C-alpha cells in the first residue's frame, strides 16, 4: 500500500487539492493518506477545508500577519522536516506555485522523498511575473518525479525543458473537479439580491507584484468605468492581505454600487461567478474556472500562464495601466459583439475527472 502525503497551505491549493484528498481517501485499499497543511493561509484555508470536509493530520500553523517570503519559506522548510521524518511517505503531492509548494518540494528533496506536482508545467518564462510564483513552479518541477499536467500545453512546456515523457500525465485541472459540485440551479444569496437588475461585475485582486501603485490603478479604473455605467453593480470579495485591504478602501470607499465583502466560501464564489456579467481579476484559478462558465475575464496582469483560456476567447490580458483597463472594461460593457465573443463556454482545463486520473497513476 502506497503512503501518500498531500501538503498545501493556501486557499487555491486547498480548492484544488481537497478533491484529490477525497478521491485518494476513498481508496483505502490502495493508499494510506496523510494531509499536512502548512497554514500559510488561516481563515481562507479553513473555509475550504470545512466545505470539503477535510481534517488535516498535521498543521504547521505558520501564518503571521504581513508575512514575508522569507518567513513562509523558512518556516515551512523547518517545520515540515519533522513531519516528513516521522511519516516517511512514499510520495508527497504538492500543488501549483505557492511558496508552500516550493518549500515543501525542497524539504522533500533534502530528505530524498519523491514529489508529485499537481498542476505541473504552467509557464510564463518570466520569473518576475507572476512573482514569486513562476520561480516556485519551475523550482518544484526541478525536483518532481511525477508531473500531473493539466493540459497538453503544460505537457509541452515540460517536454521543452527535457522532463521525461514517461513521468508526465495530462490529467485536467483538479479545480474543475470542484466546480462540478458547487454551481447550483436556484442558488440565492443576499448580495446577489442586492445586485439583481444590474449587470454584476465580480472583482478580485491579490498578486504580490500588483501590491502598491498597480493595485491603486486597477481600483481607480474599475470605479471610473462603473461611474459611467449606472446599470452595473460590483461585488468584491476582498483578500485578507492587509495591504490589499488598505488600497481597496482608499480607492473604493464611498462608491455605493461596489460592495467590498469578506472572502466568500468557494461554493458561494463559484455561484457568484455563474451569476456575474463579467469578472475583473489578477487571480490564476479564476482564469481556469471562468471558461467553463462562459464568463468573460479581464486579467489585470501583464502575463498569463493560462494561454488556453486566452485562445478560447474567455480571457483578455489588460495589464495594470489605468487607461488600458478603462478602455477594455468600457468596451466589454458597451460592445455586444465583443461580449458575445468572450462569453462562449468552453472547457480547456478539464472534464472534472482529474483527481481520479492522478489517483490511478499513483496506484499503478
Ligand atoms: C498566496 C500565494 C499566491 C496565491 C495566493 C492565493 C505565495 C508567495 N503567494 O499569496 O501564490 O495566489 O496566496 O490567495 O505563496 N492573510 C490572512 N488570512 C488568510 C490569508 C492571508 O490574514 O487566511 C493575510 C496575512 O496577513 C498574510 C497575508 O494575508 O501575511 C499574505 O498572505 P500570503 O499567503 O503570504 O500571500 P498571498 O498574497 O495570500
Ligand atoms: N475564491 C473563493 N472565494 C473568494 C475568491 C476566490 O473561494 O472570495 C476561489 C476561486 O473560485 C478560485 C480560488 O479561490 O478557485 C482562487 O484563489 P486566489 O485568487 O486567492 O488564488 P490564485 O488562484 O490566484 O492562486
Image (cartoon, grey):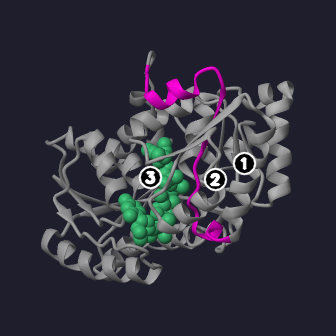
Do the residues bearing badges 2 and 3 touch, measured as CB atoms within 8 Å? no
User: Relative to 189, is 59 on the left or the right?
Assistant: left
Q: Are marks 2 and 1 in contact (CB under 8 Å)?
A: yes
Residue 99 visible from this viewpoint = no
Callout 3: few (<14), some (14-19), or many (20+) C-alpha neighbours within 10 Å? many
- The residue singled out by tag 3 in the image is 12
Residue 273's image quarter? top right
Quick one: label 3 or label 1, which is nearer the N terminus? 3
Q: Is residue 197 left or right of residue 229?
A: left
Tell me the crowding category of disc 1: few under 14, some 14 to 19, or many 20 or more residues within 10 angstroms, Cα based. Answer: many
Q: Give the residues in magenta.
A: 187-212
Asked if disc 3 is less than 8 Å from ligand 2, the answer is: yes
Q: CA distance from mark 2 to mark 1?
A: 9 Å
Residue occupying image coordinates x 28% and y 80%: 111
Front residue (pair 33, 320): 320
The residue to which callout 2 is attached is: 252
Q: Earlier in the sequence, mark 2 or mark 3?
A: 3
Q: Earlier in the sequence, mark 2 or mark 1?
A: 1
Q: What residue is shown at x 64% (from left), y 38% (from top)? A: 257
Residue 222: mark: 1
SS at mark 2? helix
**Residue depicted at 29% across the width and 39% down the height:** 51
Amino acid at each position: 500500500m502506497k503512503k501518500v502525503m498531500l501538503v498545501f497551505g493556501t486557499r487555491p491549493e486547498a480548492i484544488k487539492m481537497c478533491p484529490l484528498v477525497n478521491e485518494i481517501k476513498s481508496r483505502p485499499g490502495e493508499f494510506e493518506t496523510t494531509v499536512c497543511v502548512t497554514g500559510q493561509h488561516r481563515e481562507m484555508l479553513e473555509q475550504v477545508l470545512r466545505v470539503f470536509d477535510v481534517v488535516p493530520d498535521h498543521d504547521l500553523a505558520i501564518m503571521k500577519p504581513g508575512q514575508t517570503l522569507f518567513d513562509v519559506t523558512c518556516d515551512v522548510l523547518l517545520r515540515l522536516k519533522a513531519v516528513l521524518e516521522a511519516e516517511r511517505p512514499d510520495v508527497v503531492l504538492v500543488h501549483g506555485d505557492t511558496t508552500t509548494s516550493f518549500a515543501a518540494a525542497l524539504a522533500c528533496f533534502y530528505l530524498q522523498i519523491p514529489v508529485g506536482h499537481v498542476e505541473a508545467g504552467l509557464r510564463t518564462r518570466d520569473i518576475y511575473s507572476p512573482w514569486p510564483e513562476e520561480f516556485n513552479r519551475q523550482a518544484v518541477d526541478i525536483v518532481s518525479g511525477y508531473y500531473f499536467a493539466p493540459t497538453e500545453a503544460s505537457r509541452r512546456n515540460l517536454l521543452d525543458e527535457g522532463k521525461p515523457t514517461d513521468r508526465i500525465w495530462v490529467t485536467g485541472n483538479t479545480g474543475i473537479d470542484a466546480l462540478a459540485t458547487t454551481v447550483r440551479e436556484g442558488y440565492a444569496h443576499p448580495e446577489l439580491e442586492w445586485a439583481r437588475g444590474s449587470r454584476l461585475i465580480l472583482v478580485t485582486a491579490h498578486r504580490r507584484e500588483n501590491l502598491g501603485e498597480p493595485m491603486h490603478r486597477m481600483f481607480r479604473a474599475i470605479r471610473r468605468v462603473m461611474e459611467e455605467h449606472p446599470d452595473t453593480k460590483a461585488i468584491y470579495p476582498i483578500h485578507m492581505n492587509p495591504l490589499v485591504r488598505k488600497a481597496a478602501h482608499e480607492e473604493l470607499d464611498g462608491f455605493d454600487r461596489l460592495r467590498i465583502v469578506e472572502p466568500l466560501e468557494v461554493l458561494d464564489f463559484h455561484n457568484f461567478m455563474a451569476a456575474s456579467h463579467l469578472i475583473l481579476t489578477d487571480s490564476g484559478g479564476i482564469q481556469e474556472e471562468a471558461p467553463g462558465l462562459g464568463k468573460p475575464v479581464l486579467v489585470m496582469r501583464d502575463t498569463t500562464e493560462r494561454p488556453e483560456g486566452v485562445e478560447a476567447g474567455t480571457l483578455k490580458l489588460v495589464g495594470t495601466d489605468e487607461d488600458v483597463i478603462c478602455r477594455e472594461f468600457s468596451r466589454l460593457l458597451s460592445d455586444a459583439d465583443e461580449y458575445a465573443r468572450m462569453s462562449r463556454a468552453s472547457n480547456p482545463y478539464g472534464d472534472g475527472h482529474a483527481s481520479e486520473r492522478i489517483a490511478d497513476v499513483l496506484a499503478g
